[in-house]
Every structure is written in structure tokens, then in C-alpha cells.
Image (tube, grey):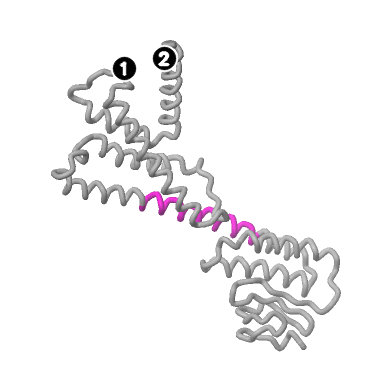
Amino acid sequence: MSYAKLNIGDVDPDHGVEIKAVIEKSADTIVYIDIYDNIMWKVNRQLPEDISAVLNQVAIQEAKSEFLAGTPYLFSCRKLLAEALSRAFMRNDLVMATSLINEAKQHIAQKNRELGRQWFYSSAYISVSVLFLLYLASLLLKEYIEILNSEIFLSFIIGGVGALMSIVTRTSNIKINATEGKVAHILDGMSRIVAGCIGGFFMALLVKSGLIFGGEVYQNNEYYLVLAVALLAGASERLVPSLINKLSRETSESESGSV
């Protein structure tokens, strides 16, 4: 059959998919995008060998753009790649084809950063919002649950806020890659906030028990000291692990010395 007869909305008899957009067509060649935003093409003639490099690059970028599935950005990206194929097939213009592929690469890289950050930061902000709601609920329930009145509970909340501060201030150092998937970024954002909460809780216990700051008693400022340390623990990724290692070494040394 002549590919020139195929139009938008038709079903490709060879692949059985509906055509969403025709990029270019002739009697023996067609490049189109199906309704699933896949790049489809058929050529009933011999192609020059130097086109293989364009085909490989288009295939690579098409695979890399898969993380855009379900977004309006996927079609625009695939359209650029399909245009590159069209230039190579119809005009043998490999220079323009390569230029379009490079433009698609930049588009994919930009959306990679944008979507990855959107997923990551949204989950972090939502997690802190949940902590805020938890704090508001504690104000209503603190008459019935004693621990809600303590610095320990508030340190748990403050630790999460500290983790959010760390995320915001270290934006350029956080590696974002949307190709890892939306769920991975959501879990990463949530886990950082949870780790901050646990760190704040842990540090509050150490201060209250006198294991750090030499057991000194801050009669007037202990409340604020605990919260400040909890905030610092949430914001720092190394503070709690380093303290745990230090306490572990001291415990081991004391045990070996008593033998």
C-alpha cells in the first residue's frame, strides 16, 4: 500500500496502532506518532548506511524520555525526535537531524530536573505539613497524653523541620534523576524528613539524659537547648551517625577497660 494514504486517526495496518500525528509521508516512507506517543516509521526503500547513527540516537533518546509518560511533555519530545527521522529519511539532511536530536536531549534533560525536583520537594513539603497537623493535634490531646507535653515529642517535630531546611539549602548538592521514577523520588523526600524526625528525637534523649554537653544542667534554657539541638540534628546528615559512633566507641572502651 501507499503510505501517503495514511492520515491522522487511521489505523496502521502493519502495526495495528492508531495514528496520532503524521510528521511526514510519501508513497514509500512515513514517520508518525501513535496514540501512545511512540515514534513509528516505515520505509520501503534502501537507506544510506550513514543514517544508522541517527536511528541509534533517536532510539536512545526515545528510551530516555520514557519517564515523561503520562505528561504532556512526552509528545513534544517525541515529535522532535520524529522530525529528526523525517529529515534523515526524506531529505538525507543528517546535519538538521542531529540538531533536532540535540534539541530533544536538552528538552529531556530540562524536564528530568523539573519533574524530579517536583516529585522530591512535594513529598518533603507534604511530609512536614503532616508533622504540622500532628503538632496541632497534640495541642488538643496533650491534656490526655503526657508525652505530648514534653520536649521529646516537640523535638521529633522540629527534627523534621530541620531536615526540610537541609533539603532547601542544599538544593544544588542533591542529585535528582527523574528516570529513576516518581515513587523513588517521593520515598526519598519522605525518608529524609523521617530521618530528621528520628534524629531530633534521638538528640533530645541524649540532652535530657545528660549524655552530651557533659551532663550540665541549663535550668533556664534547657527547653530551648533541646529544641535547638533537635533542629540541628534534623538539618545535619552526619551529626547523629557521628554521635552514635562516638558513643559506641566509648561504650566499647569502657567495657574492655572493666574486663
Image location of residue 87, percent across then percent down: 74, 70
Give the main secondary structure, helix, strand or loop, of the magenta stretch. helix
> In the structure shown, which secondary structural element does the residue marked by tag 1 occupy?
helix
Image location of residue 135, percent across then percent down: 24, 46
120, 114: nearer the viewer: 120
Q: Quadrant of the C terminus?
A: top left
140, 31: nearer the viewer: 140
Whether residue 107 is in magenta: the answer is: yes
Check if mark 2's residue and mark 1's residue have beta carbons within 8 Å: no
Mark 2 or 1, nearer chain start: 1
* Picture residue at 86% right of the left edge, 74% below the top: 46
- Mark 2 Cα within 10 Å, few/some/many (few <14, many 20+)? few
118, 15: nearer the viewer: 15
Q: Is residue 159 left or right of residue 146?
A: right
Image location of residue 152, percent across then percent down: 26, 35
* Picture residue at 80% right of the left edge, 65% below the top: 51
Q: In which quarter of the image is the N terminus?
A: bottom right
Nearest to the eye among marks 2 and 1: give it. Answer: 2
> In the structure shown, which secondary structural element does the residue marked by tag 2 occupy?
helix
Q: In this view, does 58 lie to the left or right of 194?
A: right
In the picture, the disc for residue 257 is none
Q: Residue 122, relative to residue 160: is it above or below?
A: below
Q: Mark 2 points at which residue?
A: 254
What residue range appears in magenta? 103-126
Q: Mark 1 points at which residue?
A: 214
Q: Residue 220, relative to residue 95: is it above or below?
A: above
Q: Which amino acid does label 1 sit on?
A: Gly
User: How many numbered marks appear?
Assistant: 2
Q: In which quarter of the image is residue 69?
A: bottom right
Q: Is residue 205 left or right of residue 35?
A: left
